[in-house]
Image (cartoon, rainbow, N blue to C red):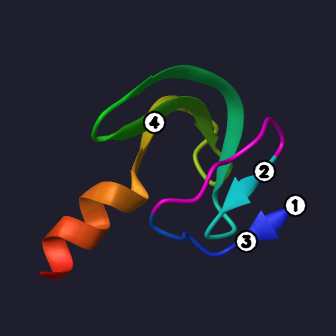
Amino acid sequence: MDSQYQHGATHQTGDVINDRYEILASLGKGSMGTTYQGRDRMLGHQNAVSAASGRLEAARAI
């Protein structure tokens, strides 16, 4: 599923963020967000993709 990046969003295997980064697996979740194993579809490289948690984004907006 192609989607634009959304802060605090939970992604699943196969999701594509910003038409570029494919989520391959969840690596870990912490208080600041979730880190995923991803693949850059333009370059073909594997990388880490981090998504900030909604709680962090809410605190940032204050």
Which residue lies at the image location 28% right of the left edge and 41% below the top edge? 32
Q: Is residue 41 left or right of residue 33?
A: right
Which residue is the extreme one toward the bottom?
62
Q: How many marks?
A: 4
Query: What kind of element bears circle 1?
Result: loop
> 43 or 27: nearer the eye?
27
Which residue is the extreme one toward the top?
27
Which residue is label 2 attached to? Answer: 15
Between the C-alphas of marks 3 and 4, the distance is 17 Å
Between the C-alphas of marks 2 and 1, the distance is 5 Å
Dots 3, 2 in contact, CB < 8 A: yes
Residue 1 badge: 1
Residue type highlighted by circle 2: Asp
Q: Nearer the viewer, mark 3 or mark 4?
A: 4
User: N-terminal of the two: label 2 or label 1?
Assistant: 1
Q: Local crowd at mark 2 within 10 Å, few (<14), some, or many (≥20)?
A: some
Residue type highlighted by circle 4: Thr
Q: Hey, which quadrant is residue 59 in on the image?
A: bottom left
User: N-terminal of the two: label 4 or label 1?
Assistant: 1
